[in-house]
């Protein structure tokens, strides 16, 4: 089994979504549900990295950003009305993602906070709030807004501290800019810093990988994410037709062992955290819902995952953003996937098993009325599993193969939908 089949950050993936017919009203979608998480999507970046397959566009002018915030406010109002009619709206956690939220100026960020808090009736200073940034946009004026408005975690995509490797990943950035951004983040007083690094870049060696790890550790980040480089269709690197680096697994193991030796704990294949630095919330992605605002955000309840249209190609992304700016029907779900009872069980299994803590058999039994091993025989993964009376979890080598195990657990229906997705 190849170790890098695909990153399972959500199940099912948005490429399994299809137009909903009829389109359900959000007040019906959210009836009796708990909206535990709030996610706000900003689809703008200053540049598109060669490995990026996110829904984002570059070089958005000020008038487009203003129009987007106008549309975001209209959507938030409609969603809030739907939630008030049918769901629990006590958010436990929130995030601004993208794209790059700090592509917005300090003034635009203030407006984003204002409209989110006012329209969604949420105090972002009272719950954990994570915001994504980049070296070019983590400026002191923007960071001051984030800190003043209650941001508790900031995540910055550095990818590599070696300029040549950043260029090889089609991410033009200067080391001095990265250092200045990290210094500014630490000076801002935001409690949790996460640094993203990528392994498998063309020309990267074990020595340069350790150099990036050690340089990141010099800022004492509370969290580090180690991502394998994926060469995906429609990205800059994908269009170059380059093969994967055969050393990915070796670099992953070296990075994992290096961070564990430095005192970090492993939360998942990608996430490493300093013990005691995590923020606890009442939110659980296996059982609670998420409200997504913005044209690239997805939302989910226990039975329906939904979003707007999805694309990666520049022309299609711009068309979807333009359509979002004109929308008035924010009270309905448009594109999505309805989870059968079997798919709900499968999602719980995948979302739990790919975490270092593993799957609680008691929680699964209480929720679904049976044992997970009766529903999903897992013998094919025996070499990578620890099966105990109360928990099933991956071994260290099993976590290393998360990007193979996760996709292998997808249902035939989801696989068929993903395979039939017309990439654009």
Image (cartoon, helix red, strand yellow):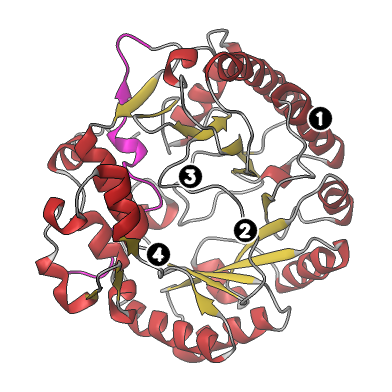
Q: Is residue 224 left or right of residue 346?
A: right
Which quadrant would residue 196 be assigned to in this image? bottom right
Query: Which of the two labelled residues, at mark 2 and mark 3, occupies the earlier sequence position?
Result: 3
Spatial CA span between label 2 and label 4: 16 Å
Q: Which residue lies at the image location 11% right of the left edge and 59% below the top edge?
A: 377
Q: In the image, residue 305 lies at what x, y percent? A: 38, 31
Pointers 2 and 3 in contact (CB under 8 A)? no
What segment is highlighted magenta in the picture?
Answer: 1-23
Q: Does the image show residue 208?
A: no
Residue named by callout 3: 54
Answer whether residue 2 is magenta in the image: yes
Mark 4 residue element: loop
Residue named by callout 2: 280
Spatial CA span between label 1 and label 2: 25 Å
Query: Which of the two labelled residues, at mark 1 and mark 3, occupies the earlier sequence position?
Result: 3
Query: Which of the two labelled residues, at mark 1 and mark 2, occupies the earlier sequence position?
Result: 1
How many residues crowd around disc 1 within 10 Å: few (fewer than 14), some, or many (20 or more)? some
Q: In the image, residue 222 lies at what x, y percent? A: 67, 72
Residue named by callout 4: 355
Q: Does the image show residue 301?
A: yes
Q: Which mark is residue 114?
A: 1
Q: Which residue lies at the image location 87% right of the left edge and 67% below the top edge?
A: 187
Q: Which mark is residue 61?
A: none
Mark 3 residue element: loop
The vertical placement of 315 against 241, above or below, is above
């Amino acid at each position: 089994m190849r170790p890098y089949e695909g990153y399972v950050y959500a199940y099912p993936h948005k490429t399994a979504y299809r137009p909903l017919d009829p389109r359900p009203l959000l007040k019906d979608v959210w009836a009796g549900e708990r909206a535990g998480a709030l996610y706000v999507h900003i689809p703008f970046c200053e540049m598109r990295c060669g490995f990026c397959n996110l829904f984002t566009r570059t070089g958005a002018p000020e008038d487009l950003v203003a129009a987007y915030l106008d549309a975001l406010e209209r959507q938030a109002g409609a969603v809030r009305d739907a939630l008030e009619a049918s769901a629990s709206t006590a958010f436990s956690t929130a995030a601004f993602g993208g794209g790059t939220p700090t592509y917005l100026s300090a003034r635009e960020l203030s407006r984003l906070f204002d409209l989110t808090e006012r329209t969604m009736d949420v105090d972002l200073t009272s719950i954990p709030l994570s915001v994504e940034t980049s070296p070019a946009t983590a400026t002191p004026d923007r960071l001051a807004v984030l800190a003043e408005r209650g941001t508790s975690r900031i995540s910055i995509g550095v990818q590599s501290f070696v300029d040549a490797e950043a260029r090889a990943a089609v991410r033009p950035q200067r080391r001095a800019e990265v250092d200045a951004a990290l210094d500014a983040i630490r000076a801002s007083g935001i409690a949790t810093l996460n640094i993203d690094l990528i392994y498998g870049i063309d020309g990267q060696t074990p020595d340069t990988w350790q150099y990036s790890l050690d340089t990141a550790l010099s800022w004492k980040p509370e969290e580090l994410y180690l991502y394998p480089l994926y060469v995906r269709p429609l990205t800059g690197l994908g269009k170059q037709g380059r093969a994967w680096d055969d050393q990915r697994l070796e670099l992953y193991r070296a990075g994992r062992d290096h961070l564990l030796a430095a005192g970090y704990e492993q939360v998942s294949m990608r996430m490493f955290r300093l013990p005691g630095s995590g923020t606890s919330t009442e939110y659980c992605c296996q059982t609670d819902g998420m409200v997504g605002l913005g044209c690239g955000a997805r939302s989910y309840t226990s039975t329906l995952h939904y979003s707007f249209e999805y694309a990666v190609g520049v022309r299609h992304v711009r068309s979807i953003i333009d359509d979002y700016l004109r929308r008035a029907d924010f009270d309905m779900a448009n594109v999505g996937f309805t989870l059968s009872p079997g798919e709900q069980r499968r999602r719980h299994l995948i979302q739990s098993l790919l975490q270092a803590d593993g799957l609680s058999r008691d929680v699964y039994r209480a929720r679904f009325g049976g044992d997970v091993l009766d529903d999903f025989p897992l013998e094919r993964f025996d070499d990578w599993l620890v099966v105990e009376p109360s928990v099933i979890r991956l071994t260290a080598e099993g976590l290393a193969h998360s990007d193979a195990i996760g996709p292998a657990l997808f249902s035939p229906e989801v696989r068929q939908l993903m395979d039939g997705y017309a990439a654009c």
